[in-house]
């Protein structure tokens, strides 16, 4: 472990704010959108969530790394964050399941981080000013000219307008057989899918076919699916026109559809609604959401910086001609759209993560709701 280094590091934000700290993980320079995640646990799942591609993640919990990293809990094949910010790295790894330290894992995957800085102050700043571009310069890079560092940050691309799906998606089809009573083949468009999502879908009886993000409707038809699923993922939904066009083909064929996170935003666009960038997004495992159908408040896991622009109250007509649509779930912190339901098509979506790795599991019932929708559609088709 190289935890207690004296190597310097500096976090530079695009508004000129600078925070001096210590190098953590790999040495060098990394650039991305600086965002904060409020989970007090589950940092391994956060780090390996492909939705964080292109983002430098700040953990608001002050003490990170005490449970190390293990080979059982990763949500994908690697760590995806562009950079990592923590206040107090754990001095030791003290969990019996750990296979390596967090610091060693960051170094192995080339993730540049910074520690020993006031993460509370940065979080408060982002909440006021909004998420912004930033860079971590560590080791020798920390000593570079301050004006040059700021220039590098300001020349980096904004998250708005970026399509990152190709960077995180599988290259070839991957199949996970059903572990529950089999229903049929499920086409999962991999926009950054998490392993827990795949396992939840397989447990509901689907043979889960994880498809590359550039497949066509003919590729989907070729597996004879009973339904289609769009996963979470990074980037701006307004830059994913091909995925929206593909989803419109799916809706035209009346295949049952379920989307989460990025998939919710793409369903919104397919139905004809717009999307917009949130000031600082929702990231963490403690976000309250109202299920309007039941009146129940769920504590949910989130990771998104964009949202659907649709009327919160009432039933409206899809601008793209797909019948009646309603907002099914609403975020209670800021009244952001957290779910959509098509009333004349077998399609719905939520903005949050019902697989909840790591926790909470209030929304896990949505996988059952999807299974019931598919079974009902099949029964109606075969009647």
Image (cartoon, helix red, strand yellow):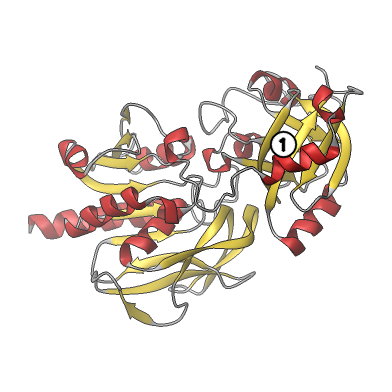
- Residue 88 position, x and y percent, is 86, 37
- Residue 254 position, x and y percent, is 19, 58
Q: Examine the image and state in which quarter residue 180 appears.
A: top left
Instruction: Determine whether 274 is above or below 355 in the image.
Output: below
Q: In which quarter of the image is the N terminus?
A: top right
- Residue drawn at point x = 53 percent, y = 38 percent: 50
Q: In the rendered image, is residue 35 in sight?
A: no
Instruction: Tell whether 202 sits left or right of 103.
Output: left
Instruction: Determine whether 323 is above or below 193 in the image.
Output: below
Instruction: Determine whether 364 is above or below 169 in the image.
Output: below
- Residue 112 position, x and y percent, is 72, 29
Q: In which quarter of the image is the C terminus?
A: bottom left
The residue closer to the viewer here, 110 or 198, is 110
Instruction: Determine whether 95 is above or below 325 in the image.
Output: above
Which element type, helix, strand or loop, lies under badge 1? strand
Instruction: Tell whether 27 sits left or right of 5.
Output: left
Q: Bin the neighbour count of mark 1 within 10 Å (Cα to Cα): few under 14, some 14-19, many 20 and up.
A: many
Instruction: Tell whether 183 sits left or right of 192.
Output: left
| Residue at the disc numbered 1 | 84
Instruction: Tell whether 171 sits left or right of 321.
Output: right
Q: In the rendered image, is residue 223 in sight?
A: yes
């Amino acid at each position: 472990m190289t935890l207690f280094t004296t190597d310097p590091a500096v976090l530079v934000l695009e508004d000129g704010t600078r925070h001096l700290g210590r190098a953590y993980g790999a040495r060098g320079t990394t650039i991305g959108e600086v965002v904060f995640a409020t989970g007090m646990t589950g940092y391994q799942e956060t780090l390996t969530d492909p939705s964080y591609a292109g983002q430098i993640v700040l953990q608001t919990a002050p003490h990170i790394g005490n449970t190390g990293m293990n080979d059982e809990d990763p949500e994908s094949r690697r760590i995806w964050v562009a950079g990592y910010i923590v206040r107090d790295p754990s001095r030791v790894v003290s969990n019996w399941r750990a296979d390596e330290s967090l610091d060693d894992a960051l170094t192995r995957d080339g993730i540049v981080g910074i520690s020993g800085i006031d993460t509370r102050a940065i979080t408060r700043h982002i909440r006021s000013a909004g998420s912004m571009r930033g860079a971590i310069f560590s080791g020798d890079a920390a000593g570079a000219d301050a004006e040059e560092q700021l220039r590098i940050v300001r020349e980096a691309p904004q998250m708005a307008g970026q399509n990152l799906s190709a960077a995180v998606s599988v290259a070839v089809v991957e199949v996970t057989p059903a572990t529950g009573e089999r229903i049929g083949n499920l086409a999962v468009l991999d926009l950054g899918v998490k392993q827990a999502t795949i396992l939840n879908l397989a447990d509901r009886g689907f043979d889960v076919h994880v498809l590359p993000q550039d497949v066509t409707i003919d590729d989907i038809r070729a597996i004879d699916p009973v339904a289609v699923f769009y996963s979470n993922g990074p980037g701006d939904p307004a830059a994913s026109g091909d995925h929206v066009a593909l989803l419109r083909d799916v809706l035209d064929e009346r295949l049952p559809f379920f989307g989460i996170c990025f998939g919710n935003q793409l369903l919104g666009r397919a139905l004809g609604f717009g999307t917009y960038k949130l000031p600082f997004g929702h990231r963490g495992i403690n976000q309250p959401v109202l299920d309007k159908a039941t009146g129940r408040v769920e504590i949910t896991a989130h990771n998104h910086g964009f949202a659907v622009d649709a009327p919160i109250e009432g039933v409206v007509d899809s601008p793209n001609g797909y019948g009646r649509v309603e907002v099914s779930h609403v975020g209670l912190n800021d009244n952001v759209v957290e779910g959509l339901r098509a009333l004349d098509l077998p399609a719905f979506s939520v903005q949050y993560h019902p697989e909840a790795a790591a926790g909470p599991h209030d929304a896990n019932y949505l996988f059952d709701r999807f299974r019931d929708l598919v079974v009902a559609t099949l029964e109606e088709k075969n009647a």
